[in-house]
Image (spheres, coloured by chain):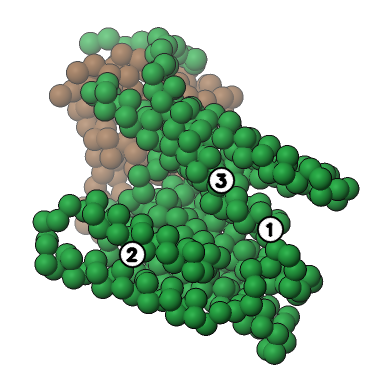
Chain colours: A brown, B green
């Protein structure tokens, strides 16, 4: 069923960051550095994306030396489809626009969600 | 700086436990990755963001605000009780009346949520900010009735508008009526479990009317306390938009009427009747507008006839809320306007129902969706 999905500019920037290396697991601080988002903005976005089944999350396996285990994220096939559906220049455009129009809604229209 | 960072990290670890299990890992993730962030302000900001995440996910700001408001209402109720004891000498018969009224109002605010907690008639509070704001403000206004009555009696003494000295007989009659109604309801339910509930409501309405005639102010305080709790409970049939439309309309009418009364009634009592008629008309007309807004703001698909009825019902509820808010606030300002606590909701219900039905018969035409931003189109 086709329906309209709306993502904020910040959400699109997170999707773009995760889309850059879709098979790799990314950690929150890495995404925050890439997108310029603060933790109080980034984690609620990741939570909403995970709730909608666009992002999957897991804890790092094993206990690394000298630092706590990281929480890791990557796009699900549905998330990959949604993020990849936008034109190729979208992430850069969104990243550039994110600081200018923080909070404004960017509509991604006509996205067909995987059933 | 190091101590502050450690304190924030500890606070984040501790507060993460407040989140439900499905959400806890996200706050723990923010805490775990704080070590990656450069020491100093950047790490502090990262941890503060984690705390913000906890506050947001645990809906703490709403809960803290609500409980602060509820605490303020409880303190206000305690203050009203103390005021009623302090201002009038015990020998004054009016003091006894005030004390009973104030105690009944305060007891209603305490007992009703406790009585209704299982069925959910009066609690818990709805999750929206509108419901919580209206609940706290409404309970404060019920407490305000006590202040208004006590202050009027302490300043004016027994006057032409005073409801008269305390009558133990009336109080006993009201108490017996309430007890008999509750007992009859329980016995009827046990004897005829499949009886039509409308018969029970009819009997309850008759008992309520008799109690109202025996002790009008106490009955009104209980009805309003129950009404405030019922329309703002989780199971309330009043939609959020209808509640907001009704409350805002009632507030606007009561403030306008209050200002007009100060202006006109200070010069002469000649215009009191005209003023009263104007206020009732204003309640009716503006409640109709609130009804239109409530009906239009009700989203819905499905059977058109059911939707039409639902919109009309929301209009009626929004209008009743507007009238009740107006009556309650006007009585807080001028105790002699107590009659508006009865007429206000009736006029509001009439106006709201008409507005709701008009809006239901002329629904909004849907507009084509328009993108206001980047207009990114993706096709599969």
Q: Position of residue B114 (x, y in %)?
A: 37, 70
Q: Which mark is residue B116?
A: 2
Whether labels 2 and 3 belong to a single chain: the reply is yes
Give the residue drawn at x 46%, y 60%. Answer: B223
Query: Which residue is more in the foreground, B175 or B324?
Result: B175
Q: Position of residue A8 (x, y in %)?
A: 44, 28
Query: Which residue is more in the foreground, B59 or A14?
Result: B59
Residue identified by numbered label 3: B344
Give the letter of the chain under mark 2: B
- Badge 3, how many Cα within 10 Å: few under 14, some, many 20+? many
Give the letter of the chain under mark 3: B
Q: Say which element carries label 3.
A: helix
- Badge 1, how many Cα within 10 Å: few under 14, some, many 20+? some
**Would you identify the image quadrant in which residue B84 lies?**
bottom right
Position of the C terminus of chain B, as image quadrant, is: top left
Q: CA distance from mark 1 to mark 2?
A: 31 Å
Q: CA distance from mark 2 to mark 3?
A: 26 Å
Please tell me whether residue B290 is drawn above or below residue B137 in the rendered image: above
User: Is residue B225 rendered to the left or right of residue B115?
Assistant: right
Q: Position of residue B1 (x, y in %)?
A: 61, 63
Q: Residue furthest bottom?
A: B91
Q: CA distance from mark 1 to mark 3?
A: 14 Å
Residue identified by numbered label 1: B336
Please tell me whether residue B196 is drawn above or below residue A44 in the rendered image: below
Q: Position of residue B41 (x, y in %)?
A: 60, 53
Which mark is nearer the camera, 1 or 2?
1
Which mark is nearer the camera, 2 or 3?
3
Compare marks 1 and 3 and give the one earlier in the sequence: 1
Give the letter of the chain under mark 1: B
Give the residue drawn at x 40%, y 35%. Answer: B314
Whether labels 1 and 3 belong to a single chain: the reply is yes
């Amino acid at each position: 069923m086709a329906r309209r999905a709306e993502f904020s500019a910040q959400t699109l920037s997170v999707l773009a960051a995760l889309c850059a290396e879709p098979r790799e697991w990314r950690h929150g601080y890495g995404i925050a550095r890439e997108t310029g988002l603060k933790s109080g903005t980034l984690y609620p976005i990741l939570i909403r994306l995970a709730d909608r089944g666009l992002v999957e999350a897991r804890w790092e396996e094993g206990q690394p030396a000298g630092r706590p285990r990281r929480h890791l994220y990557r796009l699900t096939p549905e998330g990959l489809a949604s993020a990849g559906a936008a034109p190729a220049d979208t992430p850069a455009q969104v990243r550039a626009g994110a600081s200018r129009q923080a909070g404004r809604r960017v509509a991604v229209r006509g996205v067909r969600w995987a059933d | 700086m190091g101590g502050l960072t450690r304190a924030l990290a500890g606070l984040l670890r501790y507060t993460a436990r407040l989140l439900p299990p499905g959400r806890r890992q996200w706050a723990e993730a923010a805490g775990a990755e704080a070590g990656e962030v450069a020491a100093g302000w950047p790490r502090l900001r990262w941890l503060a963001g984690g705390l913000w995440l906890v506050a947001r996910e645990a809906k703490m700001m709403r809960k803290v605000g609500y409980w602060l408001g509820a605490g303020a209402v409880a303190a206000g109720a305690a203050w009203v009780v103390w005021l009623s004891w302090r201002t009038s000498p015990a020998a004054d018969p009016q003091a006894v009346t005030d004390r009973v009224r104030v105690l009944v109002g305060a007891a209603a605010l305490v007992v009703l949520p406790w009585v209704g907690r299982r069925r959910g008639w009066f609690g818990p509070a709805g999750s929206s900010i509108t419901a919580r704001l209206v609940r706290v403000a409404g309970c404060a206004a019920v407490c305000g009735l006590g202040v208004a009555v006590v202050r009027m009696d302490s300043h004016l003494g027994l006057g032409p508008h005073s409801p008269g000295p305390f009558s133990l007989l009336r109080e006993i009659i009201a108490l017996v009526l309430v007890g008999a109604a509750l007992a009859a309801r329980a016995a009827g339910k046990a004897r005829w479990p499949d009886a039509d509930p409308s018969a029970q409501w009819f009997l309850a309405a008759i008992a309520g009317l008799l109690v109202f005639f025996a002790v009008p102010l106490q009955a009104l305080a209980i009805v309003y306390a129950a009404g405030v709790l019922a329309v703002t409970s989780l199971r309330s049939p009043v939609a959020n938009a209808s509640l907001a439309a009704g409350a805002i309309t009632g507030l606007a009418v009561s403030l306008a009427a209050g200002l007009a009364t100060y202006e006109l009634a200070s010069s002469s009592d000649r215009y009191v009747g005209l003023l009263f008629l104007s206020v009732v008309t204003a309640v009716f007309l503006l409640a109709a507008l609130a009804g239109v807004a409530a009906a239009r703001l009700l989203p819905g698909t499905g059977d058109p006839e059911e939707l039409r009825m639902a919109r009309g019902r929301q209009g009626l509820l929004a209008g009743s809320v507007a009238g009740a808010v107006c009556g309650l606030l006007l009585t807080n300002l001028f105790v002699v306007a107590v009659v508006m606590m009865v007429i206000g909701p009736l006029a509001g219900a009439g106006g709201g129902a008409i507005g709701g039905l008009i809006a239901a018969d002329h629904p909004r035409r849907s507009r084509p969706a328009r993108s206001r931003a980047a207009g990114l189109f993706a096709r599969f």
